[in-house]
Image (cartoon, helix red, strand yellow):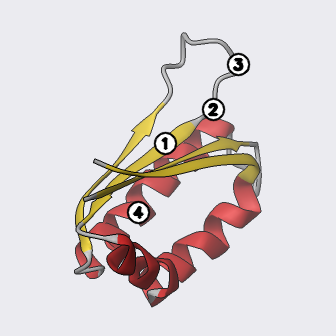
């Protein structure tokens, strides 16, 4: 199994606050979860409003059977579409993929 964790620091963009963009990202990633059959489990978590501002805003936590499934997810149209949105509202990204 592969766990894929991606964290994004979001910004105010398109008249929406950082938190509103986090909610929009969460909503849009629900579509990725529904559409990508290789994604065995996925969730989006949003940093607490009371946590330090230096924290990342959201994290995507995903599970795949193997690296081939992760690679298929990366190019899936639903993920690509999500990536287009997140690219307009992120200031930073961190990622780790590990076997467990």
Give the alpha-carbon distance from disc 3 to disc 2, as whole Å: 8 Å
The residue at 53%/40% (across/down) is 58
Q: Are marks 4 and 3 in contact (CB under 8 Å)?
A: no
- Horizontally, residue 40 falls left or right of residue 50, namely left
Q: Earlier in the sequence, mark 4 or mark 3?
A: 4
Judge by depth and name the residue closer to the eye, 25 or 62: 62
Q: Earlier in the sequence, mark 4 or mark 2?
A: 4
- Furthest residue to the front? 99
Residue holding disc 4: 29
Determine whether 77 is above or below 9 in the image. below
Residue holding disc 3: 53
User: Of tags 1 and 4, which is closer to the observer?
Assistant: 1
Q: Which mark is residue 56?
A: 2
Whole-percent x, y for residue 64 in the image: 28, 65
Q: Residues within 10 Å of mark 3 (few under 14, many from 20)?
A: few
- Horizontally, residue 13 falls left or right of residue 80, namely right
Q: The residue tagged with tag 4: helix, strand or loop?
A: helix
Q: Where, quadrant-wise, is the N terminus in this rendering?
A: bottom left
Q: Are marks 1 and 4 in contact (CB under 8 Å)?
A: no
Q: Are marks 2 and 1 in contact (CB under 8 Å)?
A: yes
The residue at 29%/68% (across/down) is 33
Give the alpha-carbon distance from disc 4 to disc 2, as whole Å: 17 Å
Judge by depth and name the residue closer to the eye, 19 or 90: 90
The residue at 32%/63% (across/down) is 30
User: Of tags 4 and 2, which is closer to the observer?
Assistant: 2
- Horizontally, residue 91 falls left or right of residue 49, namely right
Q: The residue tagged with tag 3: helix, strand or loop?
A: loop
Residue holding disc 1: 59
User: Of tags 3 and 1, which is closer to the observer?
Assistant: 1
């Amino acid at each position: 199994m592969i766990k894929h964790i991606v964290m994004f620091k979001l910004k105010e963009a398109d008249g929406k606050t950082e938190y509103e963009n986090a909610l929009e990202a969460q909503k849009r990633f629900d579509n990725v979860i529904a559409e990508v059959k290789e994604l065995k489990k996925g969730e989006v978590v949003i940093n607490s409003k009371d946590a330090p501002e230096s924290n990342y805003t959201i994290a995507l936590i995903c599970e795949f059977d193997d690296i081939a499934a992760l690679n298929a997810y990366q190019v899936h149209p639903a993920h690509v579409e999500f990536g287009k949105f997140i690219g307009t509202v992120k200031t930073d990204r961190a990622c780790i993929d590990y076997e467990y």
